[in-house]
Amino acid sequence: MHVAHLSLADFRSYARAEVPLDPGVTAFVGPNGQGKTNLVEAIGYVATLGSHRVATDAPLIRLGAERAVIRTSVVDRGRSTLVELELTPGKANRARINRSDNVRPRDVLGLLRTVLFAPEDLSLVKGDPGERRRFLDELLTARAPRMAGVRQDYERVLKQRNALLKTAAMARRAGGGKGADLSTLEVWDGHLARAGAELTAFRIQLVAALQPLVAAAYGQLAPGGGDTALEYRSSFEGGLPTSREQAEEQLLNALQAIRKQEVERGITLVGPHRDELVLKLGPLPAKGYASHGESWSFALALRLASYELLRADGGEPVLILDDVFAELDAARRDRLAELVADGEQVLVTAAVAEDVPKALAGARFTVADGAVRRIDA
Ligand SMILES: Nc1ncnc2c1ncn2[C@@H]1O[C@H](COP(=O)(O)OP(=O)(O)OP(=O)(O)O)[C@@H](O)[C@H]1O
Ligand SMILES: [Mg+2]
């Protein structure tokens, strides 16, 4: 698939922008802070309903404006779809698909699929477990949009169960160790185990599918650089579950076993929100051990593997490489370029034209002073 047109109103630094795009490689080049990342961030937002840079929508709205609009025309196997999103901080987003507003924003998921590489990806390797959980969950959603619902269900149940535990913990303290009716907690245990088991089982399947692709991509980016492994670590006991049913049973048992501690601390201590994806390079975890360059190659390998996986599902995703070449040495720069060069659409940003590898020759835009101008013939 590819984006044939991007149109922005009051998004980030842009009052207005109209950017016609072709399949193949397109590079956006311009000095720092001119709005290159803002363009690809908007495209990524349509694919994931979130920004790769910020957790809330407020920074996406142009300073002084009330709402932002992102409009993309997406062409997938010859069929064109117009996707429009209106972002108003503090309010629910509004979506339109082919000019119909009888849709929920969630319906937009799956219409545009992207794999975005960015400097922020280093935190996939070096950052907290939450970064790696989000990576898995976003990829699950890109592969199967209904996963957005599964994630939302789990978050909702977790929030309510935590609220209940917090009240219980407070009552317990006020009552000197007694008090707090916990009869409803059992109901929430059941809800949490059901929603949590589904998410856990999907993540475990995904990790198994990713593992060989990450190993292959890492080998291509850093030949002779060692073997990678991905290890999903569940926060509850009993070995990795092999089915949703088994995960549900394990989680339910774990909740019962840890109840006392949970009521003391007023928070849910087991479940997929506490699981960890361990990235290993040789026998060691990458986090805390891998060098800067190795961490970068690992992060890129995770993205490349995502790309391969989505590609194998059918409907090539759009590849976005935001400012990644400046961070790489010449050898890895060229290898990465070769690996992505034949993508249906590849969007690249770079502060200096020389950072765009030769293998990625294609259309070129300059981004400066709020304007996006096509400069090639
Ligand atoms: N909500 C907003 N309203 C107005 N301006 C904004 C908003 N959000 C970001 N900006 C401006 O956008 C600019 C950053 O744009 P962007 O991150 O796209 O730059 P870039 O071209 O990718 O730069 P670099 O080469 O450093 O990565 C900054 O100058 C910032 O002040
Ligand atoms: Mg940038």
Image (tube, rainbow, N blue to C red):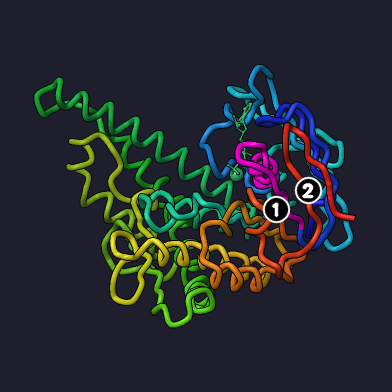
In screen coordinates, is 335 left or right of 28?
left
Q: Residue at x 61, y 37 (%)?
A: 33
The one nearer the camera, 105 or 63, is 63
Identity of the residue furthest to the left in this view = 176
The one nearer the camera, 303 or 206, is 303
Q: Quadrant of residue 304?
A: bottom right
In screen coordinates, is 166 left or right of 212?
left
| Mark 2 residue type | Phe
- Disc 1 is placed on an element classified as loop
> Is there a contact, CB below 8 Å, between mark 2 and mark 1?
no
Residue hosting label 2: 365
Q: Which residues are magenta?
A: 26-46
The answer for how far apart the CA atoms under marks 2 and 1 are is 27 Å
Query: Picture coordinates of residue 188 (x, y %)?
Result: 37, 41
Q: Residue at x 34, y 65 (%)?
A: 290
Name the N-terminal-most of marks 2 and 1: 1
The one nearer the camera, 41 or 265, is 41
Magenta segment includes 38: yes
Residue hosting label 1: 110
